[in-house]
Image: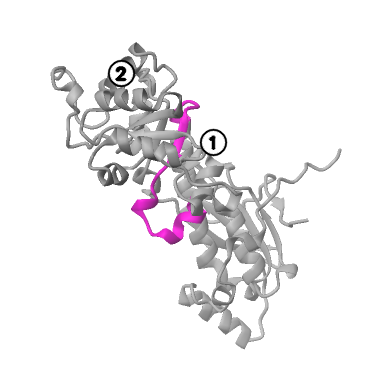
């Protein structure tokens, strides 16, 4: 039987790691640096098997980045035997996702860094996969860039991409797979044209490349139905979609006469139906509706269960909230069990040897 073909991994240099600082232990919990120094002072070079896991049903993210850290920042990558799962793999609680075997002093200083990468990126991948599944095949647009530090964008964007997000909002988020950020006509541009959404949309469409999907925010005047129709009439076939983004503190004008049996605030189910019906009545069936503003997996699930005619979901801060911590244990020493009480060696047939050939 032939060996299973290995899937491609990102080249370690894609990540532009601060190699010297990582190798010097600058980002490492001090006790790991101290442990390594003590071993070296004693001229002790234990051959260990380090095992990495987490405790949730999750979608793995950050593995290629973690492997790049080991490859570029260990003191002898060629002397290590590393086996790992892949970014985007579903993982079970306690499942081994990575093993590192070799002289502990070659990589002891890296534990803080690779665990942190796996924790952050797996959180993003898991959150994104949940909303992708809730959306039932509809587009998920990854929009949390404004809610976090800019330095996390590249890795988070890739984690979202491997988990199934269709689009990201910055070029940094898309850089590792060669994509580009996407977006809509923003409130700022509308304000720059005196609050005239139609004028701003026209000017944006005149500037935009032909292959760019023009999507226009429709809530600037708190009249999503009226604004959507005005923009559709003005742009015609050039308009790909409208984006509903009504604040959760407001009730859209189109619902003022329809309140009483539902929560009318923000982007709600009734509002989407009102916009869809209005567009269809005037022959704009091809105009898509993107919804955003406070969307979570629970809200998307409700929308889909109730048949709300949204075509895409823009999801922001909920995708970067939560936790998904990883743990690393030395479980074998010179091939013999040595794990602390409560832990044990958990070999996995899913792990594959790591190389970039």
Which dot marks residue 253? Answer: none
**Residue 294, horizontal then vertical, whole percent:** 30, 38
**Residue 123, horizontal then vertical, whole percent:** 45, 48
Element carrying mark 2: helix
Q: Residue at x 53, y 41 (%)?
A: 163
Q: Is residue 226 above or below residue 176?
A: above
Element carrying mark 1: loop
Residue bearing mark 2: 273
Residue 91, visible in the rendered structure: no
**Residue 35, horizontal then vertical, whole percent:** 54, 78
Of residue 221 and residue 338, the one placed in the foreground of this image is 221
* Residue located farthest toward the top when viewing the structure as drawn: 281
Residue bearing mark 1: 211
> Circle 1: is it few (<14), some (14-19), or many (20+) Cα within 10 Å?
few
Magenta range is 133-156
- Real-space Cα distance between discs 1 and 2? 28 Å
């Amino acid at each position: 039987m032939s060996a299973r073909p290995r899937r491609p991994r990102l080249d370690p240099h894609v990540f532009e790691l601060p190699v010297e600082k990582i190798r010097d232990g600058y980002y490492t919990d001090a006790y790991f640096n101290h442990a390594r120094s003590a071993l070296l002072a004693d001229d002790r070079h234990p051959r260990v098997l380090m095992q990495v896991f987490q405790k949730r049903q999750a979608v793995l993210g950050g593995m290629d980045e973690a492997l790049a850290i080991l490859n570029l920042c260990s003191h002898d990558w060629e002397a290590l035997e590393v086996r790992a799962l892949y970014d985007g793999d579903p993982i079970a609680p306690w499942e081994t996702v990575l093993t590192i075997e070799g002289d502990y002093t070659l990589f002891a200083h890296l534990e803080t860094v690779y665990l942190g990468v796996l924790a952050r990126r797996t959180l993003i991948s898991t959150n994104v996969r949940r909303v992708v599944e809730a959306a039932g095949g509809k587009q998920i647009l990854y929009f949390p860039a404004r809610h976090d530090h800019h330095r996390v964008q590249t890795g988070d964007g890739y984690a979202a991409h491997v988990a199934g997000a269709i689009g990201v909002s910055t070029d940094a988020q898309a850089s590792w797979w060669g994509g580009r950020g996407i977006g809509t006509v923003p409130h700022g541009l509308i304000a720059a044209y005196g609050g005239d959404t139609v004028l701003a949309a026209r000017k944006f469409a005149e500037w935009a490349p032909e292959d760019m999907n023009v999507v226009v925010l429709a809530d600037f005047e708190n009249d999503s139905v009226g604004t959507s129709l005005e923009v559709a009439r003005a742009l015609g076939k050039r308009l790909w979609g409208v984006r509903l983004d009504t604040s959760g503190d407001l009730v859209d004008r189109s619902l003022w006469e329809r309140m009483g049996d539902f929560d009318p605030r923000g982007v709600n189910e009734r509002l989407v139906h009102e916009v869809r019906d209005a567009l269809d009545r005037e022959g704009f069936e091809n105009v898509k509706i993107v919804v955003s503003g406070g969307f979570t997996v629970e809200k998307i699930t409700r929308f889909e269960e109730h048949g709300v005619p949204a075509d895409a979901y823009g999801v922001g801060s909920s995708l970067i909230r939560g936790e998904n911590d990883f743990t690393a244990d030395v479980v074998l020493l010179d091939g013999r069990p040595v794990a602390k009480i409560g832990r044990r060696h958990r070999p996995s047939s899913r792990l594959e040897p790591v190389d970039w050939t």
